[in-house]
């Protein structure tokens, strides 16, 4: 697999190098040079294939021989160890539940795959690596769980102080082992900026091999295609399929677009956001205007400058072409809360705030399209992760899964970090000396 940088000023790299670097040297994101062709036989067999088998096929088609079949098979079996069920709300509307992994959010797919692929490459070369992760809530714990106790790997999580839910904070700060949590006095965008500056700092890169596990890493995107295939293969419909993706950094949506690009029959994607609506605005006006993020109740999507936009642009020749495939929709916190109530009252289903935005986006799209369409919205997190928001809105008590309760019972362990690159850099230098 050969990858190029979306900024076009860095040389092409192998899959291995793209995974280990995360970000290209010109600050661009890695993108596959060519997209594989999946055979008709593969598509015909999809409905009877296991989730693991289809995932292996898709990963193999992209990665080629850089991992042996046995190694890749082992990684996939390990990563795709829980299902992504389609839950029917009505005969034409389905929730694709992506929260059945260890940290109860869809990021478990990408983070666990990345962690295992990286461990494989690290073990091959006997290097030490520091993984830097800026998180708006869910990435951090998913990545940390994926890398927990992997030899020669240290994980540094940066999260915005007071801007993640109490439960998310517990999940982030109680992992222990080779995982350090930094509570940054700033926003998610500040956390992301500190990480990006670290990668570009020549002095730092002489002292530590830094890598990223954010949705910019290509190994996070690949496994996110698996469940789009899983969902469509379970539907067995000849109607057009629309998939609504509650979005922040737009990794999940980009994986959906890549699935379509290699032949998965999804007619429309809905880019559903909260008030951080840079991409819906872009689809409307054709102008991409990054803004500081604003805080909402769907905080994992509070992103003012979505990184994967650079990849979305690469997939299309023009804004108009993009509009053919992607419908933008943005919603307020009030609309989100009302949707959680409505969905419970009408379908007996409890959505988390992110999934509720997906559902709202799907409804808006279905209302504008005359053709009968099957709609899927991605339910990206378990509602128990957002108990403080969701519980008051539904008249039934939300179950807290035991793996979440275990984190809640531990004490928070985080290092407070000013929003200042020098301080962050010194911390990293000290840490890399300690683990070397
Ligand atoms: C990260 C996250 C999102 C946004 O996903 P992107 O790939 O960044 O667009 C949506 N919902 C939840 C629960 C998340 O954790």
Image (tube, rainbow, N blue to C red):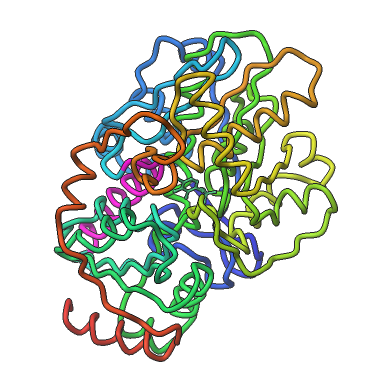
What residue is drawn where x is 74% and y is 44%? 316
214 or 29, which lies in front? 214
Which x, y percent locates residue 352?
A: 45, 39
Q: Which residue is found at the position 31% from the left and 80% from the top?
A: 416
Asked if residue 147 is positioned above or below residue 305 in the image, the reply reads: above
Q: In this view, does 314 lie above or below 256?
A: below
Q: Is residue 70 above or below residue 175?
A: above
In the image, 430: left or right of 15? left
For the point 59% across and 31% down, the residue is: 359
Coordinates of residue 367 in the picture (x, y in percent) = 76, 24
Q: Where is residue 205 in the image (x, y as percent from the top left)?
A: 38, 81
Q: How many marks?
A: 0
Check if residue 248 falls in the magenta segment. no
Is residue 106 shown in magenta?
yes
Residue 9 placement, left or right of 49: right
In the picture, which quadrant includes the C terminus? bottom left
What residue range appears in magenta? Answer: 104-125
Q: Could you say which is closer to the camera, residue 29 or residue 191? A: 191
Q: Which of 412 and 146 is in front in this view?
A: 412
**Quarter-of-image position of residue 169:** bottom left
Q: Residue at x 57, y 47 (%)?
A: 247
Task: Give the overall secondary structure of the magenta segment.
Answer: helix
Find residue 317 and report its horizontal and vertical position in percent. Answer: 79, 46
Please name whichever residue, 22 or 333, is drawn nearer the observer in this view of the structure: 333
Q: Is residue 422 above or below residue 178?
A: below
């Amino acid at each position: 697999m050969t990858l190029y940088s979306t900024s076009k000023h860095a040389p092409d790299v192998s899959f291995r190098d793209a995974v280990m670097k995360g970000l290209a040297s010109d600050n661009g994101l890695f993108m596959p040079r060519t997209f594989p062709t999946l055979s008709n036989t593969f598509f015909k067999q999809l409905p009877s294939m296991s989730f693991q088998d289809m995932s292996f096929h898709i990963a193999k088609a992209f990665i080629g021989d850089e991992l042996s079949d046995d190694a890749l098979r082992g990684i996939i079996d390990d990563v795709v160890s829980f299902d992504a069920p389609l839950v029917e709300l009505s005969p034409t509307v389905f929730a694709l539940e992506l929260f059945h992994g260890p940290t109860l959010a869809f990021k478990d797919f990408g983070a666990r795959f990345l962690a295992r692929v990286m461990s494989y490459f690290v073990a091959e070369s006997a290097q030490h690596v520091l993984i830097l992760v800026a998180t708006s809530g869910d990435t951090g714990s998913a990545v940390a769980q994926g890398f927990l106790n992997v030899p020669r790997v240290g994980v540094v999580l940066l999260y915005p102080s007071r801007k993640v839910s109490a439960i998310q904070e517990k999940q982030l700060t109680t992992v222990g082992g080779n995982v350090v949590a930094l509570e940054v006095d700033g926003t998610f965008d500040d956390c992301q900026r500190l990480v990006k500056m670290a990668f570009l700092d020549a002095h730092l890169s002489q002292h530590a091999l830094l890598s990223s596990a954010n949705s910019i890493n290509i190994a996070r995107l690949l496994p996110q295609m698996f469940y789009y295939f899983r969902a469509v293969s379970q539907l067995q419909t000849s109607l057009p399929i629309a998939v609504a993706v509650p979005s922040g950094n737009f990794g999940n949506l980009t994986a959906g677009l890549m699935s379509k690009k290699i032949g998965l029959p999804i007619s429309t994607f809905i880019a559903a956001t909260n008030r951080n609506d840079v991409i819906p605005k872009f689809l409307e006006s054709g102008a991409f205007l990054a803004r500081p993020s604003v805080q909402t109740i769907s905080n994992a999507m509070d992103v003012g400058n979505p990184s994967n936009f650079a990849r979305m642009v690469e997939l299309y020749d023009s804004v108009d072409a993009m509009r053919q495939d992607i419908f933008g929709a943005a919603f307020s916190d009030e609309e989100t809360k009302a949707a959680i109530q409505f969905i419970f009252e009408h379908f007996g289903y409890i959505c988390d705030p992110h999934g509720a935005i997906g559902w709202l986006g799907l409804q808006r799209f279905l209302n504008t399209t005359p053709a009968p369409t099957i709609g899927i919205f991605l339910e990206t997190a378990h509602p128990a992760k957002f108990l403080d928001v969701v519980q008051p809105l539904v008249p039934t008590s939300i179950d807290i899964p035991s793996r979440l309760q275990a984190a809640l019972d531990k004490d928070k362990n985080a290092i407070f970090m000013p929003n200042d690159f020098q301080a962050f850099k010194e911390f990293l230098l000290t840490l890399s000396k300690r683990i070397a």
